[in-house]
Image (cartoon, grey):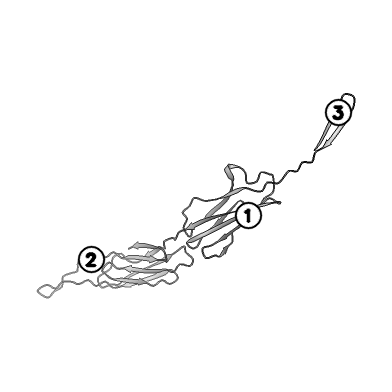
Amino acid sequence: MRLTASDEDGGVSQSTWNLTVANVGPDFEISVSAVPLVEGQTLTFTAIGVDGSGIDPGADTLTYSWSAVGPGGEDLVMPGTAASQLMPTDEGAYWITLTIGDGITSSTRTVGVQIANADPIVSGLSGGSEIASSAPLRISGSVADAGATDELTGIADLGDGVQLPLELNSGNFKLNYQYRVRRPVHRNGHRPRPRRRHFSTDLLAHSRCGSSRRFC
C-alpha cells in the first residue's frame, strides 16, 4: 500500500506500507439427513457453514474429500462435494470424516452416527387360505433383510401347538404341513362330517438383532 501526500507548492511525499492478508481456512459442520438411522436407509451428509455463514470466507475454489469407517473398522467409499451419501448395511457405529481445502489450508470434521438393526421382512406369501382336512398346507414366500451380513432364521407357528423351522434358501422358503383334525365317533360308529377349524399360521423371521412376523 502506498500513501502519497502533497502541498499547494508542489511538494510530494510518499510512504509505502506493506500489508499481508492471511488466508482463513474453511469452517463448517456436518449435518445428517433426518431419516431413520437404521441399516438399509440412505443417509445424506452435508457440509454447512457455522452459524449460518459460508463454509469459506474467501472466494476460493474448494475441494472436498469424504471418508467413512464402518462398525467393523472397514473403510467405506464416499464420493461427493459439499454433500455425500452412505447406505449402511449393518448396525453399529459409523464415523464420517470430511476434509475441505481452499488451495492453501484445509479443515477436517468428523461426525458419528449409531445405526440400528432393521427387522427382516417376510413377503410374497402364496398358498391356499382354506384346505380340506386331508390336504397338506403349502405356503411359500421370501425373507429379506437390509443387513448384508445378518444370518436369517425362521419359525412357523402352525397354530395347533406345532412349531417348525423355516428352511431359508437364498431368502426363499417353502412350507408343507398336514393338519390333523380328529372327528368324534357317534354311537352308531359313523363319523360326522368334520366342522371347519381355523388355524392361524404365524411366520416369524429372525436376524441377529431383530424379528418380523407375518400371518396367513
Name the disc covering residue 6, or none: 3
Q: How crowded is mark 3: few (under 14 residues within 10 Å), some or many (20 or more)?
A: few
Whole-angstrom CA distance, mark 2 to mark 3, is 112 Å
User: Is 11 positioned to the left or the right of 65 in the image?
Assistant: right
Q: In which quarter of the image is residue 151?
A: bottom left
Numbered-mark total: 3
Q: Where is residue 180 shown, x and y percent of the image?
A: 24, 72
Q: Tell me the mark number nearer the camera, choosing from 1 and 2.
A: 1
Image coords of residue 42 (percent x, y): 51, 56
Kindly identify which residue carries mark 1: 99
Q: Is mark 1 on a helix, strand or loop?
A: strand
Q: In this view, does 136 lie to the left or right of 43?
A: left
Amino acid residing under circle 2: Arg
* Residue 41 visible: no
Sequence-first tag of 1 and 2: 1
| Circle 3: element type | strand
Circle number at residue 197: 2
Disc 1 to disc 2, C-alpha distance: 66 Å
Looking at the figure, which quarter contains the C terminus? bottom left
